[in-house]
Structure formats: structure tokens, C-alpha cells
Amino acid sequence: MSVVVLSDPAPHVREIRLNRPEKLNALNGELRSALAGALRAVRADEDVRVVVLSGEGRAFCTGADVSAGSEYGAAAETRPEDERRRILASIDLFLDVWRLPVPVIAKIHGHCLGLATILANCCDIVLCADTATIGWPALPLGGGLLSPTWVWHVGMHRAKEMSYRIGSTITGAEAAAYGFANHAVSADQLDARTGSMAAEIARVSRDLLTLKKDALNQVHGRLGFEDAVRAGAAWDALAHTTRAATEVRAQRQQIGLKATIAAWQTQN
């Protein structure tokens, strides 16, 4: 089964659905590659005017797959420069979403955590279930990667509050109030609200939508958005060498991921 499922639910609308439900759509190399391919297909298909990005199963995406044996969950130490290159692979993919020549609507349900929040912040419009859980990873394994993208949407003080507190989360309703999301609706209305908005936008020709998106993105670009997103990879790579991150990795290796998360939740 493909880890990304494509559909065309309405004229000129392409839905890209992350499809690793057994892993809550956590990002790994296979999923990144499949998503990149889906984005290339949108670029090549002039009939597509709007993209809806969603997740199969119980979550939109829980961020990086840090399970045993995954590229993110590898116990072996790596050099900061190698870490930076690995993180940039995800960042550059998210920026491909940002640069896509058509509007992208993130449809968030369940969980949207860690790296997935950067993906959402690189979409044009964010719609979420009011009961969704959005926020930081449950363990202090990195730093300086997520918060720079949050600043643009929720402001410095809220971004710092989210960053400094381990495992901090907000609901979908709070995400809309903060500015992370455009709208929060009841979970049973999310599909209909997203479909309605996508269809309304798709009434506009692709060339005009591209011009509108470029005009807005260039303003954001002059303010430094893309530079801030990419710079986060270096900060996060350095954060992986801190004492806190080293201790958590050792703890995870000794007792496993779930037990380590449970220990941190009890401690906090």
C-alpha cells in the first residue's frame, strides 16, 4: 500500500493523504519521498488549482518517526553536520509545499506534532478539528527547529511558551485563536468545511492563484521566513548534542520509547 494516497475529490482539487496510519503518519524517508513525488505531480498537472493535505487514520501527522530502527530514532551518535543535512531533507520538502504554485490547505485532525507543525506552517491555509492536538514532541530531543516557524503565526511570547515547556500542546480551537490555524470546526464538519473551501478557491484559474500566492510569499520571503525555517536545522542539530538530549537518548535505549515518554510525563 502506498504511503501517500492521491485523489481528486472535486474539479481542480487534488487531495494528498499521508498514509501510514499504523504509525500515526509519522515521517520517515519513504513517506518524504512519496510526498515529494506527489508535489512534483501537482506542479506538472495544470488542471490542479488547489491541494488538500491530510492524514489517514487517527492523526494528521505525529512528526518524525523516532521508533527503533528509523532514521530519526537511530541510537548511534551522528555528527552535527550530518544531523543538519538529515533535518534539511525534511525542511526542504516542507518548503516545496510553501513554493507550490497552487494554494495548499492543511486539514488537521487527531495529532499534529513536532515536524508536522512546520509542514502545517508551510501550507497556505490551515483548517483543523477543534479537538485536534497540536504541539511539541513529548521528549526534549532537539530545539530551535519548530519555534521559528511558530513565531510568524502565534507571536514571540506564545512561541517561546510552547518551546520551553516539554511536550506542550494546544487544542485545535486554541490553534485558531492563536493564529496557527485559520479556522477550527467540529471533527464531524472538518471534511465538509475543507471541501467547501477548496472548491470555492478552485473556481479561480491556476495562473491567477499562482500570482496571488507568489505576491504574498514574496512579502513573507523579504521578512525572512524561508531563511528562518532553514536555519532551524542547524540549531536543532546542535541541540541534539546537549546534555538533556544525550540523557534522553540513553534513557530511551535502556527502557524504550514508550517508557521514556511515560517517565517524562510523570516527572512533569
Image (tube, helix red, strand yellow):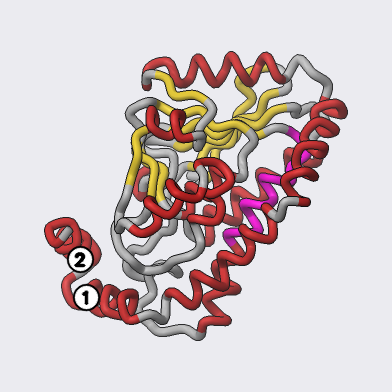
Foreground: 187 or 227? 227
As drawn, 172 above or below 71: above
Which SS class for mark 2?
helix
Q: Residue at x 75, y 42 (%)?
A: 217
Name the main secondary structure of what is drawn in magenta: helix
Is 97 included in the stretch rendered in magenta? yes
Q: Position of residue 166 (x, y in %)?
A: 30, 58
Residue farthest to the front? 157
Please identify the quarter of the rendering in which residue 220 is found.
Answer: top right
- Whichever of labels 1 and 2 marks the residue nearer the N terminus, that label is 1
As drawn, 147 above or below 131: below
Foreground: 10 or 110? 110
Is 79 included in the stretch rendered in magenta? no
Q: Residue at x 76, y 37 (%)?
A: 216
Q: Position of residue 91 (x, y in %)?
A: 60, 59
Quick check: 231 left or right of 256?
Answer: right
Disc 1 to disc 2, how far (Cα)? 6 Å
Q: Position of residue 150 (x, y in %)?
A: 52, 48
As drawn, 254 above or below 47: below
Crowd class of label 2 (few under 14; some 14 to 19; many from 20; radius 10 Å): many
In which quadrant will I find the C terminus? bottom left
Q: Which mark is residue 251?
A: 1
Q: Which residues are magenta?
A: 90-102
Q: Residue at x 52, y 71 (%)?
A: 235
Mark 1: amino acid? Gln
- Label 1 close to label 2 by CB (< 8 Å): yes
Q: Which residue is mark 2?
A: 260
Crowd class of label 1 (few under 14; some 14 to 19; many from 20; radius 10 Å): some
Foreground: 216 or 54? 216
